[in-house]
Amino acid sequence: MRIYKFDEIDSTNKFLREKEDVIEGDLAIAKVQTLGRGRRGNKWVSTEGAALFSFVLKHDIEIPEEEYMKLPLLIGYSLLYTLKKIENLDYKFKWTNDLYLDEKKISGILVEKIRDNYIIGIGLNINNLNLEEAKSIAISLREKTSKTYDLEKVIATVVEDFYNNFQEFKKGKWKEILEKINKVNYLYGKRINIVTFDKEESGIAGDILEDGMLEVFIGDEIKKYNIGSIHISKK
């Protein structure tokens, strides 16, 4: 593993994405990101005290391409697994790529494929108390527990746990993993608005399915989504 540390950088994902000699296990860590972003281009507020990092997973030719659609879910599951070891709190997983605590976002995930590598970017609110404009919708572990944490130790544990859980995934343990994910499915039973490329629909969120898609009950119909921006309905 090669580790790259930055006091400030535009984006750890961008750094690894543009690096010519990137290899599996490469890890980029930043104290501050100026252009941190989430899925679908959403901004991720990257204040000092957060764990801001990206690492590389090599595409395994023995795994069918479609199986990698489950990768954000597997990362979310693994991240939640790690957080539970650090502080045993009631974390929830929001399909497809966020973790929540006390109805507020504590982590976001961004996965990008570059050539035969997946760049996995994670923003995890740990020691940061200044959440800026996201204060009403985000939370940090320190805000919850009043403790401070060793960020590098947290990051190392997250990465190690992910690679271990990825091996379990390769061994065919997806059903067991998915069952655990659905037990902490933040959206389950909530009325949501889901926005795709061509339309917006409203319905009740159900389970995350075996193929990684989210089932949504819309009227008398059950629809499945593999992508979309989710908003909790206030009605």
Image: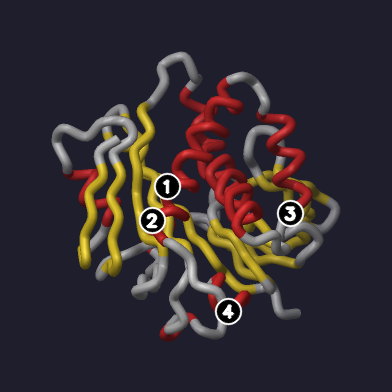
Rendering coords of residue 29 (x, y %) = 30, 55
Kind of residue indicated by mark 2: Glu
Q: Which of 48 and 37 is in front in this view?
A: 48
Could you tell me which secondary element the residue under label 2 belongs to? Answer: helix
Which quadrant of the view contains residue 9?
Answer: bottom left
Earlier-in-chain disc, 3 versus 4:
4
- Say few, some or many: other residues with alpha carbon within 10 Å of mark 4 (under 14 / 14 to 19 / 20 or more): few
Q: In this view, does 135 lie above or below 48?
A: below
Instruction: Check disc 1 and report the residue beneath it.
Output: 156
Q: CA gap, disc 1 to disc 2?
A: 6 Å
Residue located farthest toward the right when viewing the structure as drawn:
220
Amino acid under label 4? Ser
209 displayed left or right of 125: right
Which numbered disc covers residue 152? 2
**Badge 3 or badge 2: first in the primary sequence:** 2
Locate residue 199, reporting x and y percent. 56, 59
Q: Nearer the viewer, mark 3 or mark 4?
A: 4
Which mark is first along the chain, 3 or 1? 1
Amino acid type, residue under disc 1 in the picture: Ala
Label 3's element?
Answer: loop
* Label 3 sits on residue: 184
Query: Mark 1: which secondary structure?
Result: helix
